[in-house]
Amino acid sequence: MAQRLAELEDRKAQARVAGGERAIERHKSKGRMTARERVEYLLDEGTFQELDMLTRHHATGMGLDDSHPFTDGVVTGYGQIDGRQVCVYSQDFTVFGGALGETHGEKIHKVMDLAMSMGIPLIGLNDGGGARIQEGVAGLNAYGGIFRRNARASGVIPQFSVILGPCAGGAVYSPAMTDFVIMVKDSSHMFITGPDVVRAVTGENITLEELGGAVTHSTKSGVAGFVFADESSALDEVRYLLSFLPSNNLEEAPRIMSEDPANRACPELRDIMPASPNQPYDMKKVIAAVVDDGEYTEVHSAFAAQITCGFARIDGYPVGIVANQPQVLAGVLDIDSSEKAARFVRTCDAFNVPLVTFVDVPGFLPGVSEEYEGIIRRGAKLLYAFCEATVPRVSIITRKAYGGAYVVMNSKSIGADFAYAWPSAELAVMGSAGAVEIVHRRELAAADDSDDTRRRLVAQYEERYSSPFIAAERGFIDDVIDPAETREVIARSLNLLRSKREDVPRRKHGNIPL
C-alpha cells in the first residue's frame, strides 16, 4: 500500500505540472493564472474535487507518441461557490496549447453530463487554440459532443463561459451557446479564422485584437456580455452573477436581504424628467433609485446601449431589468437592441427571474439599412421573447410609448402582469407633433397663425389621445402612479406575483424568428 500511495502522489504531482515548469513560468510571466489557480480562485476554498486527473490521450503519430501528459490539457471537477454546488472545467494552455483532442473532450463531456444530472451550474474556463490538429476528426467529434450538451443544457442549468486566452475555430461555438460570455481585455480572443487567414482570403489587414479581442466582441459583435481588465475580476463576476440565478430551472434564485426597505419612497424621480419631451435623461438613474441599495449589474453594457439590460434586487429578490435608454439614440429599438434584449428576456424567463421594464421608446429605428438587414424579423425576436415569457412581468412607462415599439416593450397586451405609468407618460401611435402634422395638415396649411394653431392642436391631441389617463380609463394600464412610489409599487406587485402559475400549450418548442 505504501508503494502504491507513493506512486499515486508522484502521478498527481506530475499532473499538477503537466505542461512542464518552463511552460508554466512562461504562461505566468504574461500575467495569467494557471488552469488550477483559476479554479481555486473561483471556488470556495477547499471545495474542489478534481475528476479524471490522471487521464492521458491515446493518440499516436504526428509527434504525439512521446508526449502523454496527465490531464490531457484540461482540469475538470466540481466544487462550491458561496456554498452552492457547481461543475467546472478549465483548459490548460501549457499542455498542447489547450487544444482539444478526444480525451480532452471526453473529460468535458463527463463534467457537463454531471452538471445536467445534478441540476447545477456549469462554468467553462476557456484557454485553448481549438481542435488538436494531430488527432484529426476525433477532436472535431469531441467538439460536436460539447455543442450537443450545450444545447441540451440550455435553459435547464446556467452556463458560463470565461474566455481567458485564445478561443479559435470551432471552439467559439460552445461559448456562444452558453448564457454568459466573459472576456479579459488584451488577453482573450475569439474568432473563427485568424488575421492571417482573413488577409489571405479577403486581402483585409487586421490585428488580432481588432478581429477578435474583448473590446470588439463587447461593442461590435455583441458576443461578450462582460469585459474586465484582469482574470480575477472576470472570475469574481461569475460568482456575483450566480447569486442572481437558481441552480437550475426548477428552483428559485436565492433571496439576499437588504436593509433597504421595500416601501422606500423615491422622491428624486419626480424631478428626473426634463421639461421637453425631446430632452434625454439617464434611465440608469431611475433604475438605481428603485432597486435595492442602487446596485444594478448591466449585461452587454457597451453593445446596443440604447437599451439597458441587467440584474438587480428588489426586496432582496433578484429581478431582470429591461429599459430603454433615452441618452442613446433616444432609446429607439433597432436590430441590435432588439436581439440583445430578447436574449436577456429569454435568459430570465428560463431561470425564473421576474422581469421589470422601464419604457421610454419613440419607436423602431427607420432606415433602408435597418429594413434590408431584417428589422422586421429581428425586431420580432423581442416581441416573441416577451410573449413567450411566463415569469412575473411588471412594466413602468416613464415617458414615450409610441407605436409598435410600445407594444413590444412588455405592454399589457402581450402579457405584462401589471403595467403602470407615470403622469409624464405618452401612449400613442406616434408623437403628438408628428400626428398633428399628418391629421391636421390641411388646417395647418390654411391657418394664418400656423404656429399657434399647431400648439393648440398638439395640446388637444395630447389630452385626447396620448394622456396616460386615457389609457388608464380603457384598462390598457393598471394605474397612473406618483414616480416617488415606483419602488413600493413594483415590490408590492412582485410580492403578489410570486405565486404566479401559467399553463402553456404542450409543444416541442416554439419557432422564434431567428
Image (cartoon, rainbow, N blue to C red):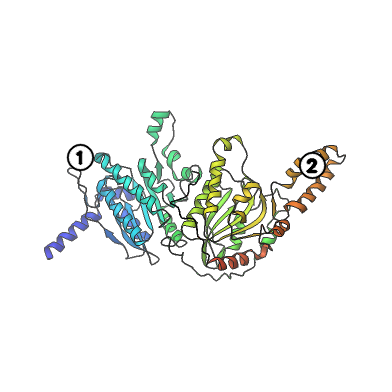
- Sooner in the amino-acid sequence: mark 1 or mark 2: 1
Against 71, is 450 above or below?
A: above
Whether residue 58 is visible to the viewer of this picture, yes or no, is yes
Q: Amino acid at mark 2?
A: His
What separation in Å lies between label 1 and label 2 (alpha carbons)? 81 Å
Indicate left or right for 256 with 189 as reference.
right
What percent of the width, then of the height, locates residue 248?
A: 41, 61
Name the disc covering residue 63, or none.
1
Give the farthest residue toward the front: 506
What percent of the width, then of the height, locates residue 486?
A: 64, 63
Give the farthest residue toward the right: 448
Which residue carries the number 2 mark? 440
Indicate left or right for 473 with 387 as reference.
right
Q: Kindly state the secondary structure of the residue where label 2 is placed.
A: loop
- Seen from the viewer's position, the closer of residues 149 and 237 is 149
Residue at coordinates 36% horizontally, 40% vertically from top-left?
169
Residue at coordinates 56% horizontally, 52% vertically from top-left?
308
Against 54, is 218 above or below?
A: above
Q: Amino acid at mark 1?
A: Gly
What percent of the width, then of the height, locates residue 351?
A: 46, 59
Name the disc covering residue 394, or none.
none
Against 127, is 208 above or below?
A: above
Indicate left or right for 382 with 113 as reference.
right
- Seen from the viewer's position, the closer of residues 449 and 282 is 449
What percent of the width, then of the height, locates residue 369?
A: 58, 35
Q: Quadrant of the N terminus?
A: bottom left
Q: Kindly state the secondary structure of the residue where label 1 is placed.
A: loop
Indicate left or right for 85 with 499 as reference.
left
